[in-house]
Image (cartoon, helix red, strand yellow):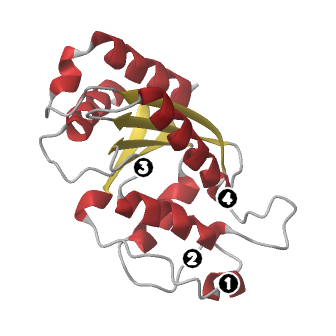
Amino acid sequence: MKKILIVNASKRRKGNSYTLESKLVEELQGKAEVTTFHIGEKDVRACLACDACKRQHTPNCIQKDDYTALIPAMDACDAMLILSPVHWDQFPAQLKAVLDRTYSFMDFTQPDMSMATRKDKKVGGFFFAGFGPVDVYTNLIEANLKNFATAGFTSCKTHVAGNANVPGSIMEKPEDLKAADEMVEWLLA
């Protein structure tokens, strides 16, 4: 059974990221082993750029915050799904901190620069934008998701649900729900 890690970057418990997470976790029952990580509720600090992780030869970080619990989950999963709002045309700060902290997976002695256990994993990003240019957000998010390759996520897929500022409104958007189902099928394949 595949291991799917869902990283939810929202701080809104009744928002679209949590609404979609509930739907997808229910759909994945019996199809995958699902772990959820709510970074909007966690203490995830910025990377110190101290390079202490480079002396350990396993994905690790000397900072003792909630990101350290995410490292083994990221390394052990088959696929990761990020659910997040768009904040000021970009990732929310804590999600950006998670991305920056994947530096802890980097190994300069490896040809692919990664000490991830597996380097064939998938990352999906399903983001919610209140207003603004969905195509621009999609390109920005896709570019950032590709940086998760350091942690072994070499394939990525992105969807941005536009006009999704009202909490729970994702359930009234059949095209976006279809895109979510397709992303889950892709993560499981």
Residue 162 seen in the current view: yes
Dot 3, how many residues are within 10 Å of its Cα: few (below 14), some (14-19), or many (20+)? some
Sequence order check, earlier mark of 1 and 3 = 1
Dot 3 falls on a residue whose secondary structure is loop
Please state which of the two labelled residues, at mark 2 or mark 4, is closer to the viewer. Answer: 4
Rendered location of residue 102, percent (x, y): 57, 65
Q: Residue at x 36, y 79 (%)?
A: 65
Q: Which residue is mark 3?
A: 90
Q: Which residue is mark 1?
A: 56
Q: Residue at x 45, y 60 (%)?
A: 96
Dot 4 falls on a residue whose secondary structure is helix
Q: CA distance from mark 3 to mark 2?
A: 26 Å
- Amino acid type at circle 2 is Asn
Dot 1 falls on a residue whose secondary structure is loop
Please state which of the two labelled residues, at mark 3 or mark 4, is closer to the viewer. Answer: 3
Q: CA distance from mark 1 to mark 3?
A: 32 Å
Query: Relative to the observer, which residue lies in front, 54 or 189?
Result: 54
Q: CA distance from mark 4 to mark 1?
A: 16 Å
Q: Which residue is mark 2?
A: 60
Query: Relative to the observer, which residue lies in front, 102 or 2?
Result: 102
Q: Are marks 1 and 2 in contact (CB under 8 Å)?
A: yes
- Amino acid type at circle 1 is Gln
Quarter of image, res 139: top right
Residue 42, above or below 164 = below
Q: Which residue is mark 4?
A: 150
Please state which of the two labelled residues, at mark 3 or mark 2, is closer to the viewer. Answer: 3
